[in-house]
């Protein structure tokens, strides 16, 4: 089982859209996929038409895998399940703080699902917190969407520095450009220059495309309702890179 | 309700199923904001169910299905509860019959191979399916259950349309909704709860059942008071069924067990005629014994070569001085000889002589009308088992450390006859009692079998070496490697011989003998 996390300290950069579409593509490839909507806003749950509610809330989930197993819902797509968001997730930091070895808690909660799923996607809320630390410890591959602006580049630096302080397990990082606006010269320039300066950037990037915004109208991944669209092709290229980088075989 | 699927069947004529989706969508009104939506275009597929001739997968609770559709061909292995255990995509449909070992490596092969063993997987049923889907949606337009409507048309073993099967599959986490949907479907007129798998349905349309096996003498249910002639006719008819059932597989050379089982039926028949033939009316046994001897002899060379080839890898792996590759020409010689012997066997099984034997033997058995009520089959079993037991004991007691191999071979034959009788009349005894009675006999037979097989294989390997030399197809390295195999066989034979005294002593012990004698007593039944 490989654990992917879509993560950025900044919000509104396309984390949920990435998790939802890559999760869908992984399931379409025949993998058994679980997507955990860790963001209390519940955008991923909304997109899959699943109520953002978990019995017992975040407290029950953090305590044990039994509640986690019971909370999993099937999406409308074969092989793709969702662990929905819950409004109590806003307190996950406090709940984790009370748990033993909080930074390892997510990894140990997910470990028993190894036989059931080939891939897990964690859709994280924006922040640097105890929750994000636990996510970073659990993940095999960190998918970091970056809007090609100077400020976004700073957040990548902050993340890299944060990870460099980790002992033991450190996730592989796959930064990629998101919401690229081809009409903006700065976007194009940063998207061209930065991968040359930093190693490990994904070749695939996701454009600022209206069809991606329509996901909230269709309440479905763009890769499902518009599989031939440019956006779907961009997500497919990103998934191919992510899958290879994570070493997901079969 | 647990997250398991539920099966329904549309009653009546399968053609009525063309409107089944409309019937459900219109009839199964879903309360509480649930609604039906079409799940997309129907998917057509060709399906084949595979199992060994003796239903090893079925008996192990497994079902193997090959599904070919627009997106390619896939093998699907399911367990007793219908849950999928493993799937395997295959580039093109494998040519069946095929050994499990020929499937692509993966979890599916790992699960099947130990169960199927040396038996080939053959299609046991075929069908075409057209599956349409309805989805039940909640008030968020979220799918909470899927209803697949499978319009299946069986093409083998019989050509018949099957009543449409409905499978309701709850989406994980929505079993409460699915429960409601299930109740609503069950309320639609003409729909009833389904029983059995699609394979069961396909076989039932041809009047068959999974697990049906061709006649086996040990499985014949005898009534203790039936006349001996009637009992023997029943046993011999079951053996003829088994023999005939294994002929096509032997001719097509599907796997080595067809010939093996055919030979078992012939051997049992010959022993039954020899030991109990007098119970049959009008010199039947005397008339047919030479013909079954011919049939047995016809099958021997092929079977001996099968045994050699089945054992080949094990023998090759035991080489110390020589290498496995040096045995290559020997293996090729065995393969060529076997192919030639198999052709001879096929000619025999397709001959008018064999057809006449099978037909006249069945007609003779069908016409057996016992003139007398006595002896009963119980009395016959008692006297024959008792006599065979005495002969086996006597033959064994005469064996000394200096006895020739032939003496052990003769004892083996007596032991086989005793064992066949016990098995043949098996339904007259409690299975546990029978099993206990033959425990030491089985161990003695295994020892004698190992001794005799090694003896035969040693003689054969010499003959093979001479044939290869004559054909100038035997490099020196190969002959040396064959010599090493012969030495290994001699060691195996010596080991079996040194085990013999202990095995026979256990068989001849008063406790073992009294357990066997109990089978021969009138009250044993």
Image (cartoon, coloured by chain):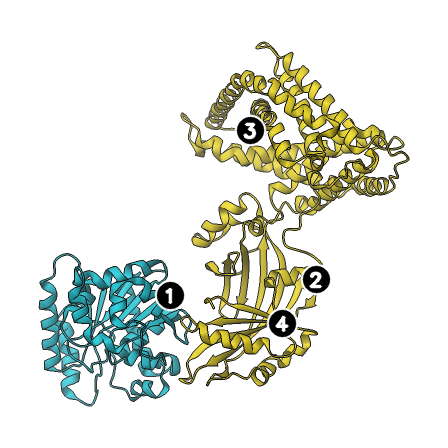
Circles 3 and 4: CB atoms closer than 8 Å: no
- Residue A128: x percent and y percent? 13, 72
Callouts 3 and 4 in the same chain: yes
Residue closer to the observer: B256 or B59: B59
Task: Give the vertical position of B239 relative to A212 (above or below).
Answer: above
Quick check: B198 above or below A25? above
Q: Is residue B298 among the parts visible in the rendering?
A: no
Q: What is the C-alpha distance between the residues marked 3 and 1?
A: 59 Å
- Residue B447 image-quadrant placement: top right
Q: CA distance from mark 2 to mark 4?
A: 24 Å
Q: Chain of mark 1?
A: A
Residue drawn at 20 percent across, 83 percent down: A12
Relative to residue B411, is residue B182 drawn left or right? left
- Label the yellow chain with its letter: B
- Tell which tag, 4 or 1, sits nearer the viewer: 4
Name the mark on residue B192: 4
Judging by colour alone, the chain drawn in cyan in this rendered image is A
SS under mark 4: strand
Foreground mark, 2 or 3, reads: 2
Sequence-wise first label, 2 or 4: 2
Q: CA distance from mark 3 to mark 4?
A: 72 Å
- For the question of whether residue B382 can be seen, the reply is yes
User: What is the CA distance from the residue labelled 2 to the residue labelled 3?
Assistant: 52 Å
Between B347 and A45, the residue placed more toward the observer is A45
């Amino acid at each position: 089982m490989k654990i992917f996390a879509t993560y950025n300290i900044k919000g509104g950069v396309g984390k949920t859209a990435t998790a939802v579409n890559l999760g869908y593509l992984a399931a379409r490839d025949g993998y058994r996929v679980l997507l955990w909507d860790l963001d209390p806003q519940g955008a991923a749950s909304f997109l899959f038409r699943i109520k953002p509610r978990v019995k017992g809330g975040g407290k029950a989930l953090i305590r044990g895998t039994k509640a986690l197993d019971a909370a999993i819902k099937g999406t409308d797509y074969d092989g793709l399940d969702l662990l929905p968001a819950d409004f109590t997730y806003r307190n996950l930091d406090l709940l984790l703080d009370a748990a033993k070895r909080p930074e390892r808690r997510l990894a140990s909660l997910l470990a028993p699902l190894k036989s059931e799923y080939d891939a897990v996607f964690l859709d994280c809320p924006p922040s640097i917190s105890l929750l994000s630390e636990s996510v970073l410890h659990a993940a095999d591959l960190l998918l970091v969407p970056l809007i090609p602006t100077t400020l976004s580049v700073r957040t990548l630096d902050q993340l890299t520095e944060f990870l460099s302080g980790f002992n033991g397990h450190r996730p592989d990082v796959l930064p990629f450009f998101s919401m690229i606006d081809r009409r903006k010269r700065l976007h194009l320039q940063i998207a061209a220059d930065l991968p040359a300066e930093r190693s490990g950037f994904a070749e695939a990037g996701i454009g600022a495309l209206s069809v991606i915004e329509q996901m909230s109208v269709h309440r479905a991944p763009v890769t499902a309702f518009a599989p031939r669209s440019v956006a779907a092709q961009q997500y497919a290229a990103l998934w191919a890179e992510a899958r290879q980088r994570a070493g997901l075989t079969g | 309700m647990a997250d398991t699927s539920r099966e329904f069947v549309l009653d009546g004529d399968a053609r009525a199923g063309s409107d089944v989706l409309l019937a459900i969508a219109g009839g199964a009104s879903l309360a509480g904001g649930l609604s039906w939506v079409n799940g997309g275009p129907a998917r057509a597929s060709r399906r084949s169910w595979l199992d060994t001739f003796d239903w090893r997968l079925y008996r192990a609770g497994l079902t193997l299905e090959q599904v070919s559709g627009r997106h390619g061909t896939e093998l699907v292995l399911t367990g007793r509860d219908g849950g999928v255990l493993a799937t395997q995509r295959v580039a093109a449909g494998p040519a069946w019959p095929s050994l499990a070992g020929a499937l692509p490596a993966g979890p599916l092969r790992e699960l099947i191979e130990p169960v199927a063993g040396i038996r080939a997987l053959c299609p046991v049923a075929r069908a075409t399916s057209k599956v349409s889907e309805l989805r039940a949606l909640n008030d968020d337009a979220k799918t909470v259950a899927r209803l697949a409507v499978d319009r299946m048309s069986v093409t083998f073993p019989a050509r018949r349309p099957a009543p449409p099967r409905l499978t309701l599959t709850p989406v994980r986490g929505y079993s409460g909704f699915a429960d409601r949907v299930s109740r609503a479907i069950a309320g639609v007129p003409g729909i009833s709860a389904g029983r059995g798998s699609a394979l069961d349905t396909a076989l039932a349309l041809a009047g068959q059942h999974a697990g049906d096996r061709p006649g086996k003498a040990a499985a014949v249910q005898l009534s203790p008071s039936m006349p001996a002639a009637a009992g023997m006719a029943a046993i011999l008819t079951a053996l003829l069924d088994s023999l005939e059932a294994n002929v096509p597989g032997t001719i097509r050379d599907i796997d080595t067990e067809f010939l093996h089982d055919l030979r078992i039926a012939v051997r049992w028949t010959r022993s039954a005629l020899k030991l109990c033939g007098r119970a049959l009316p009008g010199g039947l046994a005397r008339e047919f014994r030479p013909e079954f001897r011919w049939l047995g002899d016809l099958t021997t060379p092929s079977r001996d070569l099968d045994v050699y080839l089945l054992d080949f890898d094990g023998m090759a792996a035991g080489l110390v001085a020589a290498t496995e590759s040096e045995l290559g020409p020997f293996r090729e010689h065995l393969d060529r000889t076997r192919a030639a012997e198999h052709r001879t066997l096929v000619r025999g099984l397709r001959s008018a002589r064999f057809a006449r034997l099978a037909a006249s033997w069945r007609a003779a058995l069908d016409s057996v009308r016992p003139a007398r009520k006595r002896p009963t089959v119980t009395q016959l079993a008692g006297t024959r088992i008792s006599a065979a037991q005495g002969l086996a004991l006597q033959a064994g007691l005469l064996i000394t450390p200096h006895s020739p191999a032939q003496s052990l071979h003769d004892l083996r034959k007596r032991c086989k006859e005793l064992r066949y009788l016990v098995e043949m009349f098996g339904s007259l005894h409690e299975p546990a009692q029978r099993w206990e009675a033959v425990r030491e006999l089985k161990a003695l037979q295994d020892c004698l079998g190992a001794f005799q097989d090694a003896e035969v294989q040693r003689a054969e390997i010499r003959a093979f070496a001479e044939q290869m030399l004559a054909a100038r197809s035997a490099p020196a390295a190969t002959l040396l490697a064959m010599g090493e195999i012969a030495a290994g066989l001699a060691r195996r034979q010596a080991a079996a011989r040194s085990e013999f005294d202990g095995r026979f002593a256990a068989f001849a012990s008063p406790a073992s003998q009294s357990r066997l004698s109990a089978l021969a007593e009138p009250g044993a039944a």
